[in-house]
Each structure stands twice: as C-alpha cells, then as structure tokens.
Image (tube, rainbow, N blue to C red):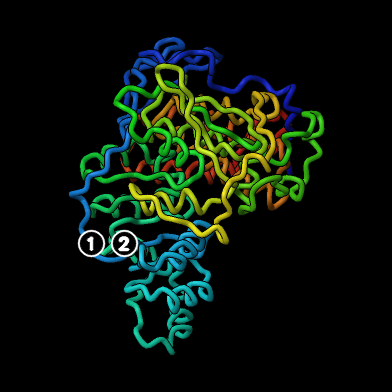
Amino acid sequence: MALNLPSPAEVKSVFFSDSFKSTRHAKFPGGFALKRKDCGTTVGRQVSCSVQTPPPAWPGRAVPETSRKTWEGPKPISIVGSTGSIGTQTLDIVAENPDKFRVVALAAGSNIKLLADQVKTFKPQLVAVRNESLIDELKEALADVEHKPEIIPGEQGVIEVARHPDAVTVVTGIVGCAGLKPTVAAIEAGKDIALANKETLIAGGPFVLPLAQKHNIKILPADSEHSAIFQCIQGLPEGALRRIILTASGGSFRDWPVEKLKDVKVADALKHPNWNMGKKITVDSATLFNKGLEVIEAHYLFGAEYDDIEIVIHPQSIIHSMIETQDSSVLAQLGWPDMRLPILYTMSWPDRIYCSEVTWPRLDLCKLGSLTFKVPDNVKYPSMNLAYAAGRAGGTMTGVLSAANEKAVEMFIDEKISYLDIFKVVELTCEQHQNELVTSPSLEEIIHYDLWARKYAASLQISSKKAPIPA
C-alpha cells in the first residue's frame, strides 16, 4: 500500500537545507537539531563538529607508476559479480582482447548456468558462489570440465576471489553493500579497483579512502560519468580542477509534466530513452537518484567540494561528463552510450586499446547533429536536494540514503508503493537516522546502518497523521 504523499509541488523542503555552502560548520535550518554520534553536543541548530573534506582517492590528477607492473603477458583480473551487467560486459572485453587480459577468478550470486558457461570459456583458477546452496549445482554443471577451478562458497569465497594472489585489478560489479567487504579485502591485498560498485564510496568512502591511500592502490571508476571525469583530469597539474559537471539523460520522465508523475506506472519508469540497463538503475535514472549518488561519488573520488559539483540534463547522453579548469576551460569526454568503453579504460589504464569499428562504432558528430542541455528541475527531481544534503552531512548518512533508495525502488518495482513515494521513503529514513549519524564510521558501522536503513524503509506504513510507523 502506498504512502499518502502529495504531488512534488506540494512536498515540503527536504530535511537538510541545501542553501548553505561548505563552511567549517554545517548549519541545518529547520525545526530540528542534528546530532552526530561521534561529535560534541548539538547547540541550537548548529552542528558542533566541522564538515570534513575527504581525502580524494585520486588527487585531481592521474600519474601512472610504471614500476607498479608486476605481470607478464595478458593482464590478470578478477571479477566480482561476473554474471551481472558489468561482469558480462567485462568478459565481452576479455573475449575480444585475449592478448591483453586474462581472468583468474570469478564470483557470482546465483546464476549458475551463466557462471558455468563463463568458467568453461575463460578457465579461471578460482570461482565463488555467494548462494552456498547452489554449490552442488555448479559442480554438476562443471562435471565435464577437464581443468576444474577451485570453488569456494559464500561470502568468504567472494572475498577470496577479490584478493586472488595473481589478480592485478579487481572489477567490482556486485551490487549493494555486499561489495564492500570484497573490495576492502582487495585493497588490503594491494589490488587496483575497477570500481562499478557504488556503495564502495557512497556508503564506505570515509573508511575505504584512507585504506586505499594506506595501501597505495588505484581506484579507477568504471561508470561512464566518473570515467569521463577521470579521463578529463589526465595530465592536469595539482589544483587545476575547478568544477565537475555531471551530465544526466533525465531518464524516462524528462519530458513529462510534473503533474503527471502521480500516475507513473512501473512499466513507464523502465522505458529509458537512451540506455538498456537493469530495473533498479533505470528507475534511479528516472528519479535522478543515480545522479545524486554520483555527486557523492565524485566528491569522494576527486576531492571536489559539493558546491563545485553540478548536474546538467543532456538528453543525448553523448557527453558523459565534463570538468572546468581554473582558467575556465571546459573539457568533456564524448562517446556513444556504451558501458564497455569506461569498463575497458579501467582495465587498460594508463594504456589505450584499439577497438574494432565492427563491435565499437566510432562517434560521428555530423550524423549525430546537435547536443542540448538544460537545468534539472528540483521539483521533478527532489532526489538532488536529498543527495546533496546527505553528502554534506557525511559519515553514515550517505550510505543510509543509498540503502533507503535501493529498498524504496524495490518496493516500487514490486508495486508496494507509488513512484512519488520513493522520494518520501528516502527522506523519512534519512530523517530517522539523524540522531545516530556517525561521521567517521568503521566498516561494521557502515554495514550496520545499511541494513538498518533497508529495514526501516521497508517498515514505513500509512498512518492517520501521514507519519511513518514501524510495521
């Protein structure tokens, strides 16, 4: 049953004020006081601890270290989430470039048929199945394989794939906080990360970034927007980055009037105009939560202040993102909407690999015609204010935002709530988290509040006073 949420035009301002700048102290105007668990007491409406700028995983520029190469022949990689969208596209790249890459380990969830096919094709040394009950099914499927891989079940198996001793780079395509522990294990083992798991930074940034710096590993973004930014900052001197401009397609409802959003059906939200993606990310594109989460990622990846990260609607999805340098030059990365390109670059960096025109069509701007841009509508996309506010709060709030959104999208797809309820579920969950916010969380606290947010979001019901009550 859906929450009784008014139309976007009637929705009150989000619980965090987005009007303040990134100053020493975060001020949150409104009818409540925000208290952070590991800070001092709250005084009036001002938080008594400073907003910390995170150490960037890559300090605004990329400098390859030739001395880091430790392998001969094709680059050895592990893939966590091999049967998902990122994993299968990664394996397509390996299949097309067997002289450049080889697979040493694969981890999947429950798609045993596809995993077995991948094992037969790519011959990894180690395989993990997160769903332990399916181990026997995998062994049966691989009964006729001459050189059988080692098989390790459960979460421990996924961790072992991530830190496989022969792997140089680990592609993290697993969804959700399930990707956090394997990514941490890979970092501690000295593996570079081809990052496709958003929770690694959105939820785990305060913990993961210092760890990455400690172990001197590279976090290479595999999603199209952050790959574009990463490519644009190549060769920039330190301090040259002035502004990040994230482009957004606008999703399924970019041309819909706000008044019509109350009538949205699941099938409507899943009709993305440009990309062919999974259900969750397609809905996130419609709500623009995907872009709000990418703002948080960009903050952690490149060390940019939230005031210096902007979102612009670009319906054609040809410019994947842009940067502005200190002298006001704007640099952009362009290409057809194809996730294989950013994935390939995370795997090949700092090299560029030649791609066949048959499977990798080259961009023809003359055939394309025109590129257009517009300012995103905060009324149509209240997710933006929520994401910026959560980012400025920092700590565990960003992970709570992401987890609540993931649960809300799941509830929407299952037709338990309406489209507009997604925003309300996320807002109410973040509001509830205020008194428990931890600014410098441990890995255990990050995972704890991820699980808490999902449970709380799922518990929201209608009450006579339109307030959330536990189920």
Q: Nearer the viewer, residue 64 or 54?
A: 64
Residue found at x 36% / y 35% = 234
Residue 16 % position (x, y): 53, 21
Identify the image quadrant of residue 64: top left
Residue 262 % position (x, y): 79, 35
Mark 1 vs mark 2, CA separation in Å: 7 Å
Number of other residues with Cα within 10 Å of mark 2, as a class: few under 14, some 14 to 19, many 20 or more: many
- Determine whether label 1 and label 2 are within 8 Å by CB: yes
Residue 161 % position (x, y): 33, 64
The numbered dot on residue 438 is none
Which residue, as the protein is rendered here, is positioned at the far left?
67
Q: Viewed as shown, does residue 259 lie left or right of 395?
A: right
Residue 283 % position (x, y): 65, 45
Which residue, as the protein is rendered here, is positioned at the far front?
366
Q: Viewed as shown, does residue 86 lie left or right of 128?
A: right
Residue found at x 70% / y 30% = 466
Residue type at the position of mark 2: Lys
Residue found at x 42% / y 40% = 203
For numbered disc 2, what is the local secondary structure?
strand
Identify the image quadrant of residue 200: top left
The C terminus is located in which quarter? top right
Q: Is residue 460 above or below residue 119?
A: above
Q: Which residue is mark 1?
A: 71
Residue type at the position of mark 1: Trp
- Asked if residue 471 can be seen in this view, the reply is no
Q: Is residue 40 above or below residue 409?
A: above
For numbered disc 1, what is the local secondary structure?
loop
Residue found at x 33% / y 47% = 350
The numbered dot on residue 75 is 2
